[in-house]
Image (tube, rainbow, N blue to C red):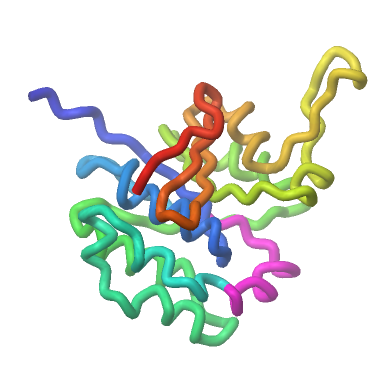
């Protein structure tokens, strides 16, 4: 059997439940043994500390199904939420990945927004690193539609508002998958070729 080529898989890492769901999907469904996992965080000091206290109050990673995720120590994820705001949650995510998929190399990348919007920072970094697959948590809401991006078009009448995830899906040169975790343990996946694809856990 031919071994698939090694890939660089980037998971956008934030201290939010939907980012944790994206990581859970990557560990249980997307990663292959020869892949490399990169946890990429776009630093925005004004907002991340406000969300850290609510990060993963639900044991999303620990409760997932799949061989890799089920091997996780059950207390890893709750510990992220119980520690102080100064905790390096990226190290905690990396540790959880190493428990779930010990054969897959994991590294952390961080960068500042530096006055740019998050989507273009992610696109630029993914090109620099030669990323083959981007996985990002997606939370559909009215606010994301109202505060989205305007899709370039020939005239403003046909323009469409896109949130960060949709912008990445439409503009990334590599495959980008938006992940929404559902209450039944499954996922709704969005990519350029598949919209609202249900994946049962």
Residue 128 in view of the camera: no
Residue 167 coordinates in the image, percent (x, y) = 67, 34
Q: Image quadrant for the N terminus? A: top left
Is residue 89 found left or right of 34 in the rendered image?
right
At a point 54% along the width and 41% down the height, the residue shown is: 178
**Up-down relation of residue 25 to residue 82 (above or below):** above
In the rendering, at what x and y percent does residue 31 appear?
Answer: 30, 43
Depicted 157 relative to depicted 30: above or below = above
Which residue, as the protein is rendered here, is positioned at the far front? 184
The mark tally for this picture is 0
Q: Nearer the viewer, residue 25 or 167?
A: 25
**Left of 42 or right of it: where is 198?**
left
Q: Residue at x 33, y 67 (%)?
A: 96
Image spot of residue 85 (x, y percent): 59, 82
Residue name at image x 35 percent, y 76 percent: 76
Q: Is there any visible trace of residue 42 in the rendered image?
A: yes
Q: Position of residue 188 (x, y in %)?
A: 50, 42
Is 185 a magenta residue?
A: no
Report the front residue among 107 and 83: 83
Left or right of 160 in this view: 80:
left
Residue farthest to the left, as pictured: 1
In the depicted structure, whether residue 57 falls above or below residue 146:
below
Which residue occupies the foreground of this view, 157 or 14?
157
Q: From this view, report whether residue 28 is shown above or below residue 165.
A: below
Residue 41: in magenta span: yes
- Highlighted range, magenta: 40-54
Residue at position x 50%, y 71% from top? 56
Residue 145 occupies quadrant? top right
């Amino acid at each position: 059997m031919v071994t698939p080529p090694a890939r660089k898989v980037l998971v956008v890492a934030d201290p939010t439940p939907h980012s944790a769901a994206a990581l859970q999907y990557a560990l249980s469904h997307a990663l292959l043994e020869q892949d490399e996992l990169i946890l990429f965080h776009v630093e925005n000091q004004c907002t991340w500390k406000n969300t850290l206290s609510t990060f993963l109050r639900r044991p999303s990673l620990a409760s997932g199904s799949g061989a890799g995720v089920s091997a996780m120590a059950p207390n890893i994820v709750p510990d992220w939420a119980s520690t102080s705001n100064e905790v390096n949650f990226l190290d905690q995510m990396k540790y959880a990945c190493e428990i779930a998929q010990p054969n897959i190399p994991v590294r952390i990348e961080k960068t500042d927004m530096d006055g740019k919007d998050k989507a273009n920072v992610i696109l630029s970094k993914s090109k620099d690193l030669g990323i083959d697959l981007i996985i990002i948590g997606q939370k559909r809401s009215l606010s994301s539609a109202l505060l989205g991006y305007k899709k370039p078009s020939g005239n403003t009448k046909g323009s469409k508002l896109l949130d960060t995830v949709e912008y990445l899906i439409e503009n990334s040169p590599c495959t980008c998958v938006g992940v929404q975790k559902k209450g039944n343990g499954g996922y709704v996946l969005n990519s350029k070729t598949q919209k609202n694809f249900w994946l049962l856990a």
